[in-house]
Image (cartoon, helix red, strand yellow):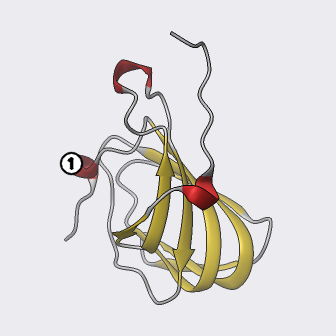
Amino acid sequence: MANFEIAQLDETLAVDCPCGQARRAFADLGSRSVASVHLTDIHADSRVHYHRQMTEVYVVLEGHGEIELDGERHPLRPMTAVMIHPGCRHRATGNLRILNIPIPAFDPADEHFD
């Protein structure tokens, strides 16, 4: 078994998510999935959600918008990084391309809506 993983995000199938469309890598490695990486395109206001177990790091690659964190809005622009702790209700708005790093790896069962 290799001691590394490589993913080509621009060739990964995009899936719908509360934020828009995400290309997900490394979420399906079983016990070796300590984190995953998502290239996410946000083209409309995303849906407020939270995670009970997962921390997320957003890094804005392109575009401008806002992120709502527990009801408070903050501006987003390229090279802005945001760490979202478990329990924080959040959503991004605007036209954005972000790199999202969930820790531990993304689990769809840990996506919750009020």
In the picture, measured across the screen, residue 103 lies left or right of residue 110, that is right
Rendered residue at 34%/75% (across/down):
48
Q: Position of residue 84 (x, y in %)?
A: 51, 54
User: Residue furthest toward the top?
Assistant: 1
User: Residue furthest toward the front?
Assistant: 11
Q: Position of residue 108 (x, y in %)?
A: 26, 51
Q: Amino acid at mark 1?
A: Ala
Q: Would you place residue 33 above or below residue 49 in this image?
A: above
Say how many tags the image has: 1
Rendered residue at 47%/64% (across/down):
22
* Secondary structure found at label 1: helix
Q: Position of residue 104 (x, y in %)?
A: 43, 35
Q: Which picture quadrant has residue 78?
A: bottom right
Foreground residue, 21 or 107? 21
In the picture, measured across the screen, residue 1 lies left or right of residue 82, that is left
Rendered residue at 80%/65% (across/down):
79
Q: Would you place residue 12 above or below residue 68 in this image?
A: above
Quadrant showing the C terminus: bottom left
Q: Position of residue 67 (x, y in %)?
A: 56, 76
Residue identifier under label 1: 109
Foreground residue, 64 or 38? 38
Q: Which picture quadrant has residue 61?
A: bottom right
Foreground residue, 11 or 75? 11
